[in-house]
Amino acid sequence: MDPTVLQAGFDLLGDGRPETLWLGIGTIFMLLGTFYFIAKGWGVTNKEAREYYAITILVPGIASAAYLSMFFGIGLTEVEVVGRGTLDIYYARYADWLFTTPLLLLDLALLAKVDRVTIGTLIGVDALMIVTGLVGALSQTMLARYSFWLISTIAMIFVLYYLATSLRSAAKARSAEVESTFNTLTVLTLVLWTAYPILWLVGTEGAGIVGLGVETLGFMILDVSAKVGFGLILLRSRAIMGDTEAPEPSAGEPSAAD
Ligand SMILES: *C/C=C(C)/C=C/C=C(C)/C=C/C1=C(C)CCCC1(C)C
């Protein structure tokens, strides 16, 4: 590894991987998030709220497993890149993101109450973004790596544009509570998701301006914010209670929504 590039971390396992510090801290934050959301959702009976809990608990749950594997060096491979030498690629990230990013989008789509075709399109393009990002990370020439980065970034722009336009107006049509929670989460998503391709580009997968330690720290902060931070905002909002405002109508008595 190039010793001149910016580095950070601590080789916790003594196997020459200073980034294990950040992967270990990431595992702990994801586990804390998972258990906090489980505890918070324990007594929740509202049917719609339970859907949001199920999705939002899975997100840091999946990431905990991915972070723990990366901590132990599983889901790590070496790629020989022309002119760059051997790169350490943590491909377990992409497996994590392939499941967690659609789940995060599903939370937003449920808030906006959009139809199945819209949800399918959004998740399909999102999956394309992750898969092309993985292909880029595993490619052996810089031209191929940057080409796939570009395709992935175009897919990401499509997803974020869709969130900020169609889904946003659908959320607006529901209630002030939903609109406000949706907007907060969308701004968070726009800012955090945009940072991923930038970090990839300046990190070891791209130009190599920052080393693997700094890059791993960066992805850890982004992942924890985009998953646990996102969940904290969503699950404390009354927007997840759905259209039937608590208290639930008593049996047999038709509610205004029926
Ligand atoms: C919890 C994990 C999240 C929110 C991950 C989001 C990841 C991205 C938005 C990744 C995007 C990428 C590109 C747009 C280009 C190339 C590589 C990626 C996969 C880092």
Image: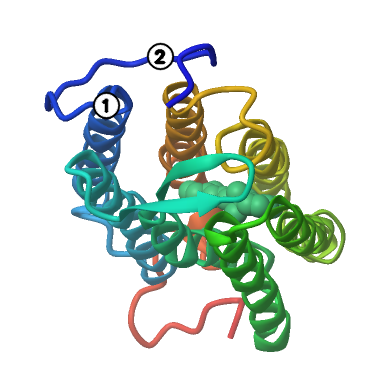
Instruction: Please tell me which residue is depicted at 22% across the width and 52% down the height of the picture.
Output: 74
Q: Is residue 247 visible?
A: no
Among the two numbered marks 1 and 2 on one chain, the one whose residue lies closer to the N terminus: 2
37 displayed left or right of 152? left
Determine whether the residue tagged by mark 1 lies in a helix, strand or loop.
helix
Residue farthest to the left? 13
Q: Residues within 10 Å of mark 1 (few under 14, many from 20)?
A: some
Amino acid beneath label 2: Ala
Displayed quadrant of residue 150? bottom right
Residue 235 versus residue 105 in the image, above or below: above
Coloration mode? rainbow
Which amino acid is tagged 1? Ile
Which corner quadrant holds the C terminus? bottom right
Location of residue 161 with respect to 8 vertically, above or below = below
Q: Which residue is nearer to you in this view: 102 or 2? A: 2
What numbered label is drawn on residue 8?
2
223 over 253 or under it: above or below: above
Residue appearing at x 73%, y 80% in the figure? 118
Image quarter where the N terminus lies is: top left
Foreground residue, 138 or 226? 138
Q: Where's residue 16, x and y in %?
A: 23, 26
Q: In this view, does 238 lie to the left or right of 115?
A: left
Q: Pick whichever, 258 or 195, lies toward us.
A: 195
- On the question of residue 153 being in view, the answer is yes
Q: Residue 152 carries which label?
A: none
Return the x and y of residue 147 as percentages of the image width and height.
Answer: 78, 60
Q: How crowded is mark 2: few (under 14 residues within 10 Å), some or many (20 or more)?
A: some
Measured in 3D between alpha carbons, the distance from the residue under mark 1 to the one under mark 2, in whole angstroms, is 14 Å
- Residue 192 is left or right of residue 69, and the answer is right
Residue plotted at (59% across, 39% down): 84
Residue behind mark 1: 25
